[in-house]
Image (tube, rainbow, N blue to C red):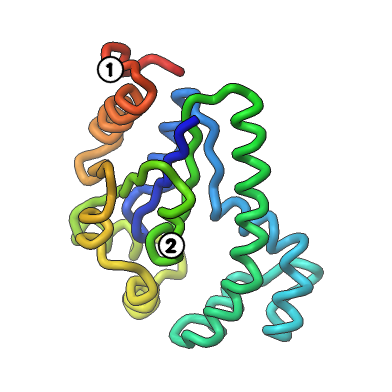
Amino acid sequence: MIVLGLTGSIGMGKSTTAEMFADLGCPVHSADAAVHRLYTGAAAPLIEARFPGTVRSGVVDRGMLGTRVLGDPAALRDLEAIVHPLVRAEEVRFLAEAREAGARLAVLDIPLLFETGGELRVDRTLVVSAPPEVQRARVLARPGMTPERFEAILKQQMPDDEKRRRADFVVETGDGLAGARRQVETILAGLTGDENKAGTRI
């Protein structure tokens, strides 16, 4: 089984691209979704212990936690030390289940793939990318997002051009969903040995 690490900076269309792989029959594990689950479960008491007041009724207040860690490298490292091992344990279970099910390709959707050395845990890497002006417009359209918060998030992420340089594949999302879908189909067909069957489910 091939393990594909999928990543991309904020606003690039990473989650949508991961959904395209899922629609084509690939098992996909989202690190973001795993974090959401952990913030209502195993991670919540650990985060409250380190960042008092950030958990309400057993659920992590993501806005409050973000305010505490953005711009504070030491606090961010402490948060990562809590969350990353729990997410990776979920990944291990996910990959074992995918192999047991006979999947030819499984996707790990990891926002900070290169930043955390995650490329060492996968066979191939894919970066989702879009022009800077498209990225900025998408992100600033999100509820509660400000230019200052956007810039703070970007500082925590590897520059897009560096991610593109490191990746085995790049999916461009700036021209819309149809074009991105065709790119995903081509990549999937090549990785699974179905070069003549692009567009079919695996």
SS for callout 1: helix
The residue at 18%/55% (across/down) is 131
Residue 137: image location, x then y, percent? 27, 60
The 10 Å Cα crowd at callout 1, few under 14, some 14 to 19, many 20 or more, is some
User: Which residue type does callout 1 highlight?
Assistant: Glu
Residue drawn at point x = 31 percent, y = 67 percent: 158
Residue at the spot of label 1:
195
| Residue situated in front as seen by the camera: 85 or 44 | 85
Q: Considering only vertical position in the picture, is 185 above or below 13? A: above
Q: How many residues crowd around disc 2 within 10 Å: few (fewer than 14), some, or many (20 or more)?
A: few
Callout 2 touching callout 1 (CB < 8 Å): no
In primary-sequence order, the first of circles 2 and 1 is: 2
In the rendered image, the vertical position of residue 19 relative to residue 113, given as above or below: above
Question: Which amino acid type is marked by label 2?
Answer: Gly
Q: Residue 32 location, x and y as percent?
A: 54, 55
Identify the residue shown where x is 70% and y is 84%.
50
Quickly name the residue at label 2. Answer: 117
- Drawn side of residue 67 relative to residue 179, left or right: right
Judged from the image, the secondary structure of the residue bearing numbered disc 2 is: loop
Q: In the rendered view, would you say 50 is above or below 176?
A: below
Q: Relative to 164, say whether 162 is above or below.
A: below
Residue occupying image coordinates x 70% and y 76% = 47
In the displayed structure image, the side of residue 35 where residue 111 appears, left or right: left
